[in-house]
Image (cartoon, grey):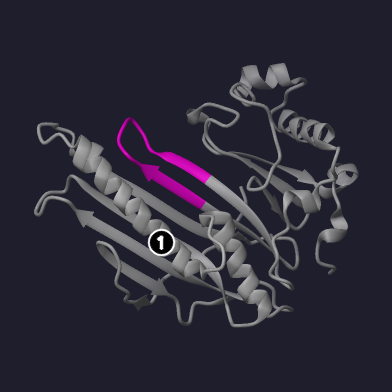
C-alpha cells in the first residue's frame, strides 16, 4: 500500500456550528508537497459530537473530518481547493472548509433523525446506537513529481455487525491546481485493454494463471468486474495504483484491494503527456 503524508497534530481554531464542533487548522505543520512548486497543503478539521440523551453514551454520533487544503490566494491554490470541494462533497464555488462543514452538518441531521427513530432504550448493545463517520485525507509520499496523489479514507458505522470503509482518490496537478481525471489520462476506446492489464497485474501478484483461478483463490472479481474510473486510481512516481473498496469487486472480508501497474505496462492506454514535466 502507498505511503501517506499526514499533517498532524492540529492547532485548534474554534468555530461554531451544529452540535459540539471544533474546527481546526494547522499553523506550523504545513507541507510543501513539491519543493519546486508553490502549493502548500495544511490540514483543516471539522469535529461534531452529540449525545442525544444527556449522561448516556447512546444514542450519540461522532463525526470527524480531517482534510488537506492548499494554502494561499493564488489561482492554483484556489482551483486545487475547488477541485477538493467538488470531488469529495459535490459542492461548487465554495471553500473546501465550508463544503466540509456543510456536509458534516447535513450528516449530523441525518444521524439525529435515524437515532431518534430507531433507538431502543431496552437494547443491551449501546454501541449499535453510537454512530460514527471519520474522513482522513492523505497524500501519497511517492506521488508522481508535480502531482498530489490525494486520497480520503472514510469509515462509517451506523449500526449492524461492522462499519464500512471507502477510499476515494483524486490526482491534482501542483502547478495548475487542476485535477487529472480519467478522461484526461486514459485513452478513449482502450477500456477493455486497460482492464485486461489490471487483471493481469492482480493475477501475477497472486500467482494465478487466469481470472477464474484468481476468483477462486482470492475472491477478487467475485462480486464485480475490475474497472477504472474517476476516484479509484492514484498517479505515483513509477506506477498507477488502482483501488477497490469492499463489496466492489470482492467480499467485505477482503478489505480494500489495491494493485500497482507500471506506466510502461499501461503505455498503450494512457496519455502520459498530461502529467507535469520533470
Q: Is residue 30 visible?
A: yes
Residue situated in front as seen by the camera: 169 or 4: 169
Image: 25 above or below 18: below
Residue at the far right: name it: 268
| Residue at x-position 60% and y-position 29% | 249
Give me the residue at 74% from left, 68% from top.
Answer: 146
Measured as percent of width and height from the top left, residue 41 is found at 57, 73
Magenta residue check for 194: no
- Residue wearing tag 1: 102
| Residue 13, image quadrant | bottom left
- The quarter of the picture where residue 149 lies is bottom right
Q: Nearer the viewer, residue 240 or 203?
A: 240
> What secondary structure is marked by label 1?
helix
- The foreground one among 270 and 215 is 270
Q: In the rendered image of this protein, does residue 153 appear above or below residue 125?
A: below
Q: In the image, is 271 to the left or to the right of 171?
A: right
Which of the image's four quarters has the C terminus?
bottom right
Mark yes or no: residue 7 visible: no
Q: Residue 272: x and y, percent?
A: 85, 55
The answer to which of 12 and 210 lies nearer the viewer is: 12
Q: Residue at x 23, y 42 (%)?
A: 115
**Is residue 28 toward the left or the right of residue 106 in the image?**
right
- Where does residue 234 sit, x and y in percent of width and height? 68, 52
| Residue segment shown in magenta | 153-166
| Figure label count | 1
What x and y, as percent, mark residue 104?
Answer: 38, 57
Near mark 1 (Cα within 10 A), the count class, few <14, some 14-19 or many ≥20, is some
Q: Give the residue drawn at x 53%, y 30%.
A: 247
Quick check: 21 above or below 109?
A: below
User: Which quadrant would residue 76 be assigned to in this image?
Assistant: bottom right
Amino acid at each position: 500500500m502507498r505511503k501517506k503524508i499526514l499533517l498532524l497534530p492540529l492547532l485548534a481554531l474554534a468555530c461554531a456550528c451544529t452540535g459540539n464542533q471544533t474546527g481546526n487548522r494547522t499553523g506550523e505543520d504545513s507541507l510543501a508537497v513539491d519543493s519546486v512548486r508553490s502549493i502548500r497543503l495544511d490540514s483543516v478539521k471539522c469535529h461534531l459530537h452529540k449525545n442525544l440523551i444527556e449522561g448516556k453514551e447512546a444514542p450519540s454520533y461522532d463525526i470527524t473530518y480531517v482534510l488537506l487544503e492548499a494554502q494561499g490566494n493564488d489561482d492554483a491554490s484556489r482551483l486545487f481547493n475547488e477541485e477538493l470541494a467538488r470531488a469529495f462533497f459535490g459542492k461548487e464555488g465554495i471553500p473546501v472548509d465550508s463544503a466540509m462543514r456543510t456536509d458534516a452538518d447535513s450528516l449530523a441531521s441525518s444521524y439525529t433523525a435515524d437515532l431518534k427513530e430507531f433507538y431502543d432504550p431496552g437494547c443491551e448493545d449501546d454501541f449499535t446506537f453510537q454512530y460514527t463517520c471519520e474522513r482522513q485525507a492523505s497524500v501519497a509520499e511517492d506521488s508522481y513529481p508535480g502531482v498530489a496523489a490525494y486520497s480520503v479514507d472514510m469509515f462509517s458505522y451506523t449500526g449492524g455487525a461492522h462499519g464500512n470503509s471507502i477510499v476515494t482518490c483524486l490526482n491534482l496537478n501542483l502547478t495548475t491546481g487542476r485535477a487529472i481525471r480519467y478522461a484526461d489520462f486514459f485513452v478513449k476506446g482502450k477500456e477493455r485493454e486497460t482492464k485486461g492489464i489490471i487483471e493481469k497485474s492482480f493475477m501475477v501478484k497472486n500467482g494465478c494463471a487466469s481470472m477464474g483461478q484468481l476468483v477462486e483463490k482470492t475472491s477478487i472479481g467475485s462480486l464485480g468486474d475490475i474497472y477504472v474510473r474517476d476516484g479509484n486510481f492514484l498517479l505515483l512516481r513509477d506506477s498507477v495504483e488502482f483501488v477497490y473498496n469492499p463489496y466492489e469487486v470482492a467480499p467485505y472480508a477482503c478489505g480494500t484491494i489495491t494493485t500497482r501497474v507500471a506506466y510502461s505496462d499501461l503505455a498503450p492506454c494512457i496519455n502520459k503527456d498530461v502529467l507535469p514535466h520533470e
